[in-house]
């Protein structure tokens, strides 16, 4: 008796692997592997979440109306162009399911968010990975890769896992070179982290275009990763298509009310952003002084490279740190076997991981 069989391309998929939270045999660990915000969420968001407990018998607002209006008010956007989801990866997934299928092509960077290739394969489309340029998306490389089969182009800006970014002028140049039928997805998950003056998350480009959508999240600097809240801002036709196929109650009730208070508390966000920028600069300088290659970052993490002439490897460093309770993200599965991704943590965690790496590089792996 034969068992049910999924599409053939599904069985070729490698599932998304999140950052580790535990190590066997190590009781206490410090998780610096998942790009979470160590500053924590707004106390107002936590209070709203707690107060929502009495309403758990109710379905949430299927259209996330209050949340969309709060986002629109804070960022000066049109609420009717906003869609909310269970994290921005929910919206990214629905985008691929809405616009791509067998015979279609989806373009993304070689080093980019793993949801893009996974969900592209999930719908039977062909993923086209374009090598990064100076760790960010390569605009000319992407434009050369466009064919009549191209349906979507994804640009995570800033990039995950590298931390590099493109100025808005490059995003606009990319859009200008794309055919009108191609959807440009500007994945701005780390927008709140950015301090570079020539950066823009993409809202203005959305408003003067019909084929652009910007995606955002509450999982990073708003520190609501555990609630899974994301949003997108796109052309009316794109938003209409996504609303037709998304799950009807895709953002739960406590997540909606917490996100409303989080986005309204811009003072708390500003404090988190300032802390992140301060430690991003400090850690970059200290790690470069250790002889590591550190990609200039505009996110809440750093990509650390071990030089080819180094007697030690990223894998050995990962083992050394893990055994001492510090969890970073080793990236061989993303084609970066000699790199670690380090999330910015609390001050004592940041200092400790630097000292551990110093000890590792000055000694020999155990």
Image (cartoon, rainbow, N blue to C red):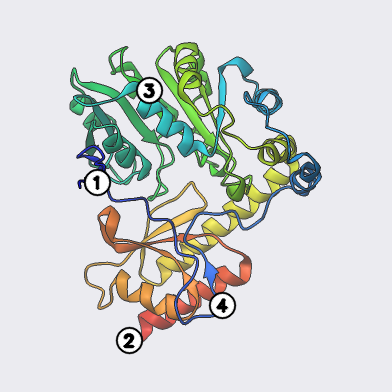
First in sequence, mark 1 or 2: give its number.
1
Give SS at disc 2.
Answer: loop
- Mark 4 and mark 3: span between their CA atoms? 43 Å
Residue tagged by mark 4?
28
Q: Position of residue 124 (x, y in %)?
A: 24, 32
Q: Nearer the viewer, mark 1 or mark 2?
A: 1
**63 or 294, nearer to the observer:** 63
Q: Is 299 left or right of 331, judged from the image as shown?
A: right
Q: Nearer the viewer, mark 1 or mark 4?
A: 1
- Mark 1 and mark 4: span between their CA atoms? 43 Å
**99 or 275, nearer to the observer:** 99
Give SS at disc 4.
Answer: loop
**Is there CB contact under 8 Å for labels 2 and 4?**
no
Give SS at disc 3.
Answer: helix
Label total for image: 4
- Mark 3 and mark 1: span between their CA atoms? 29 Å
First in sequence, mark 3 or 1: give its number.
1
First in sequence, mark 2 or 4: give its number.
4
Residue tagged by mark 1?
3
Q: Nearer the viewer, mark 3 or mark 1?
A: 1
Disc number placed over residue 98 in the picture, else none = 3
First in sequence, mark 1 or 4: give its number.
1
| Residue 170 in view here | no
Q: Which residue is at the far front?
A: 1
Res 36 quadrant in image:
bottom right
Q: Is 44 left or right of 290, judged from the image as shown?
A: right
Disc number placed over residue 364 in the picture, else none = 2
Residue at the location (53% across, 39% down)? 87
Q: Nearer the viewer, mark 2 or mark 3?
A: 3
- Mark 1 and mark 2: span between their CA atoms? 51 Å
Q: Position of residue 114 (x, y in %)?
A: 35, 45
């Amino acid at each position: 008796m034969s068992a049910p069989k999924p599409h053939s391309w599904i069985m070729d998929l490698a599932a998304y692997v999140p950052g580790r939270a535990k190590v066997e045999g190590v009781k206490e660990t410090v998780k610096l592997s998942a790009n979470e915000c160590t500053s924590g969420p707004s106390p107002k968001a936590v209070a709203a979440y707690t107060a929502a407990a009495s309403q758990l018998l109710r379905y949430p607002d299927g259209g996330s109306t209050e949340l969309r209006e709060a986002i629109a008010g804070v960022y000066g956007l049109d609420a009717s162009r906003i869609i909310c989801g269970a994290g921005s990866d929910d919206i990214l997934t629905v985008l691929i399911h809405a616009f791509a299928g067998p015979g279609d092509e989806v373009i993304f960077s070689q080093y980019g968010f793993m949801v893009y290739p996974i969900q592209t394969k999930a719908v039977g489309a062909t993923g086209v990975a374009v090598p990064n340029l100076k760790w960010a998306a390569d605009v000319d490389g992407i434009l050369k890769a466009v064919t009549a089969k191209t349906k979507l182009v994804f640009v995570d800006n800033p990039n995950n896992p590298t931390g590099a970014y493109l100025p808005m002028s490059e995003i606009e140049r990319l859009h200008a070179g794309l055919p009108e039928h191609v959807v440009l997805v500007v994945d701005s998950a780390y927008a709140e982290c950015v301090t570079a003056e020539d950066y823009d998350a993409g809202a203005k480009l959305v408003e003067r275009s019909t084929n652009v959508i910007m995606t955002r999240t509450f999982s990073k600097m708003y520190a609501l990763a555990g609630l899974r809240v994301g949003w997108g801002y796109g052309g009316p036709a794109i938003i209409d298509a996504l609303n037709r196929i998304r799950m009807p109650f895709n953002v739960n009730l406590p997540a909606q009310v917490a996100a409303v208070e989080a986005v309204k508390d811009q003072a708390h966000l500003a404090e988190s952003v300032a802390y992140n920028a301060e430690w991003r600069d400090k850690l970059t300088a200290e790690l470069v002084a250790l002889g590591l290659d550190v990609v200039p970052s505009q996110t809440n993490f750093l990509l650390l490279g071990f030089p080819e002439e180094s007697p030690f490897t990223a894998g050995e460093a990962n083992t050394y740190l893990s055994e001492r309770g510090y969890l970073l993200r080793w990236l061989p599965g993303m084609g970066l076997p000699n790199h670690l991704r380090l999330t910015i943590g609390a001050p004592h965690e940041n200092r400790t991981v630097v000292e551990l790496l110093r000890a590792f590089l000055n000694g020999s792996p155990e």
